[in-house]
Image (spheres, rainbow, N blue to C red):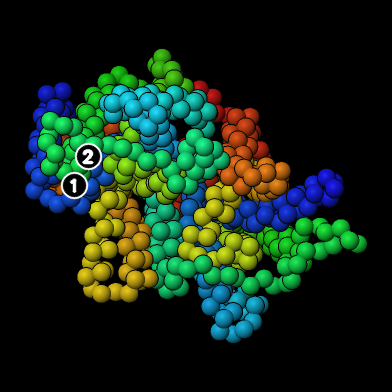
Amino acid sequence: MTMQTLPRRLGVAVVTAVIVGFLSIKLDTFRDYQIAEVAYEVTAVAGLTVLTGLSGQISLGNGAFMAIGGYTTALLLMHLSWPFVAALVASAAVAAAAGAIVGVAAARLRGPYLAGATLMLGVALPSVAYAWPGIFGGDQGLNVTFTTPAFLGATFPLTRWQAWVSAAVALVTLVLLANLCYSRVGRNWRAVRDDEVAAALDGVNVAATRILAFVVSAVCAGLAGSLLAIVTSLVAPGAFTITLSIALLTAAVIGGLGSLPGALWGSLVIVLVPTYVTDVATSHGLSSSVGSNIPIAAYGVVLILVMLVFPQGIQGGLRRLLTTFTGPDPKTRPWHDASAAHVTPSADEAPASQHEKEGTS
Amino acid sequence: MPVVEFLQFTLSGIVFGMIYAAIALSLVLIWRGTRVLNYAQGGMAMFTTYIAIEVIYHTGSYWAGFVVALAAGVVLGAVCQLTVIRPTMNKPPLNAVIVTIGLLILLEGLAGIFFGGQYRSFPAAFSITGLKVGTTPLGVSRFDVFVVAAVLVTTLALAAAFKYTSVGLRMRAAAFNATIARLSGIRVARMFTVGWALAGLLGALAGVLVSPSTFLYPNSMDAIFVFGFTAAVIGGLDSPAGAVVGGLLLGIALSYVAGYGGSKGSDLTSLVALGILVVVLMIRPDGLFSATKVRRV
């Protein structure tokens, strides 16, 4: 990993930005919308892959932080007419505060207990919008007004501008996360994930390290929620259901847990696979009840197959593919063996004797 | 009358609590054996309930549908474990989580393809008009009594089977320590499959029992699953008794919230469930009925 230096990461980000800019001009409005969608998904998924893959804490409720970010942005734009950038920063700050609270509560919880608590958070938080419709607009949600800036001219398509803004925020977030992951903070996360006792003996503050991971992932989700608000022009509880939270975790795991490129692959899968299968189904003239459900079933099959064929996710599969061509890389990345630390024994071994070792189920 | 109201809310809370308990128990059965949390449990229950509704429609007999649903639950549980869960057992634990989520999505998609996405009403075995003592309505029906009795009987039968039969002993041994169980000649992998099959049966039971009050559609069991999971976490995932207590606790508490919460009541149930969960986990991070276990850093 000698090459993972700041200039290289910035280079990758700039190249990606150029590609995204080129694509957004070449492709139609719907594809621009999908670029924006992938951009906000990857922002949230990257935060979650850090939380779960690096610090070893599962979250089935990161959609709640997205809701916090989205509603913060909507309220600030609507009532105070803040500029979007200010609202974006404020959304991240509010989400960070929420992440700190959840992180403190989560610091004692492990495995399925943490999964259950965060799942309930993801289910419960959107109901705040129903309970106080005066502030949050109830079922209808709040409209978000977002326009192209004047200097781009009146004919510049809004979706392209939305795609640019989302992609820019996503890329900046990814670069910052990549730096964080290779810093002392990232090493502490991995140390705590692999062995709490050993990390504590080495002077790592385990609780603070775990809480910080929650704050970082909440900030990412808050930014993503803010982007979702301006891309869809609406924040409503229906956008932040538990399905969203589960999709985020799904994307992180099938992309390759703990890997930032994996977060991108996973986001592409959850955004593009359902649309692609719908296109295929409608072009074959299937009836609507069948046609609208085939993408759902196919999505389920894709999740199962990716997990069985590429246990380390898509990024893990790609790496394995590369090593078969180039031979094994002696400088293996330390954090990509996220799973190696807590592999459950096979069905023929002793899962029940592993009470202490249960990972992030 | 406040007393009557309180009684009504409590009784209807117990009815829903027993359904959460059935789902929670099915999760505990699977967790104890295979250390997998089955997020598809609700989806499996939804699918078997659709099978029941088709059987009832074609045969005209409720009990034929009831029995077929339970049998389908057993088969579905075992098939899922053998086909997609067993290959994940030597992989990272989150893979099994995603596989069960994939299974849930697949089942919901298949239900939409085979049975259509529209809401369908599901028949109840007995009258759903409220029972009365004298002139005082109790807020529960004959069918609600059946719901409680069915879950109770199934739970006690399972508990007896675990305690007194050879298969039960072998399953407990496999869950307690798979290596030693294997050295004693127990087919551990097969015991895990039996665990999934029994969990499938409990889930199917919960699906058939809850659907008369929720309607049936591909996502109809999602909320029931979330509360069942919450109940299992409250009780402690290693404790069958905890699952039942957690289910009843949650069912009764949520019934009070919905009953006394006024216009906001139904919106607040999931927030209150979150509150209960957080309070319980702050005091006992591994649930109310967790065995004492040292984890210190």
Question: How many badges with numbers are in the image?
Answer: 2
Dot 2 or dot 1, earlier in sequence = 1
Residue A306 spot, x, y in % from top left: 29, 54
Q: Secondary structure at mark 2?
A: helix
Pointer 2: what residue? A162
Q: Nearer the viewer, residue A214 or A63?
A: A63
Front in this rendered view, residue A282 or B224: A282
Q: Look at the image and tell me whether residue A305 can be seen.
A: no
Relative image position of residue B43 (x, y in whole percent): 49, 60
Q: Residues within 10 Å of mark 2 (few under 14, many from 20)?
A: many
Q: Position of residue B192 (x, y in %)?
A: 52, 58
Q: Classify 10 Å Cα crowding around label 1: few (below 14), some (14-19), many (20 and above).
A: many
Subunit under mark 2: A
Extreme residue in the right direction: B134
Which residue: 51% across, 67% down?
B119
Question: Given the image, on which type of amino acid does mark 2 rest?
Answer: Gln
Quadrant assignment, res B169: bottom right
Q: Are marks 2 and 1 on the same chain?
A: yes
Numbered mark located on residue A32 in the image: 1
